Structures are given as structure tokens and as C-alpha cells.
Image: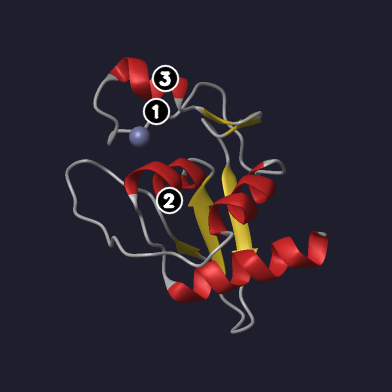
Amino acid sequence: MLNVGWLSREHDYQKKETPEGLVKALAKLAENSVNVQRGMHFCELCPSFQVARENTSWNDTFIGSGEIHVTSSRGVTYAAPAMIVHYVDSHSYSPPEDFCTAALQIYRSLE
Ligand SMILES: [Zn+2]
């Protein structure tokens, strides 16, 4: 299993355009996140703690804990924080292409 999207303000990350529908797909996958812990994970990239606290949810989906696991057609399973929804949506994070493709494929298979 490979980790994807565990961002910190202390490290740069890839920013570029992401495939259309990726945020929506990740948000859908976050509805069934795994490894949900007690407590919350706050975004370190938001300008203030107040803003980060408001971003522990994306629309009605709680993203302040838990992980999204996706397996690509290459057979690689990725573990991303549910917060990746917010990272892509608000901080222009661009996850690896294989992860994006897998997330979109799984999302489409749920529709
Ligand atoms: Zn943020």
C-alpha cells in the first residue's frame, strides 16, 4: 500500500490541474472512509485554525478523520487521508495520475 496526499505545510507538493470530477469522486469515496480515528485531523495549509476547523467537512461529508483506499488497475493500493478532498479542492493539490484514475474509475462504478 502506498500513501498519497498526506500533506504538511513543511513540505512542497505537486500543484497542477486535476482531472474533471476528481473532487466529487474523492468526496464520494470519503463517505465510506476507513481507519477512522477518534479526534480530528486539521488542514495545515489553511491560513488559520478557524478556517481549518471549518474545512473538516466537505459539503455534508466529514473529512477530518479516516482514509480513502483505492486500488488502481496496476494493482497498487493507495491510502489517502479523507482530507485529500479539501487539499485538491482548496489547495490545488494534484495527486499522482494513477491514484486519480483509480479514484475516478471506482467513483464511476458506484454510479
Ligand atoms: Zn486547508
- SS at badge 1: loop
Horizontal and vertical percent position of residue 77 = 58, 68
For marks 1 and 3, the one nearer the N-term is: 1
The Cα atoms of the two marked residues, 1 and 3, are separated by: 6 Å
For the residue carrying disc 2, how many other residues have a C-alpha within 10 Å: few (<14), some (14-19), or many (20+)?
A: many
- SS at badge 2: helix
Horizontal and vertical percent position of residue 97 = 45, 74
Tell me if label 1 and label 3 are in contact, CB under 8 Å.
Answer: yes
Amino acid, disc 3: Arg
**Tag shown at residue 53:** 3
100 versus 84 height, above or below:
below
For the residue carrying disc 3, how many other residues have a C-alpha within 10 Å: few (<14), some (14-19), or many (20+)?
A: some
Q: Is mark 2 within 8 Å of ligand 1?
A: no
Horizontal and vertical percent position of residue 23 = 54, 52
Which residue is tagged 2? Answer: 88
Q: Quadrant of the C terminus?
A: bottom right
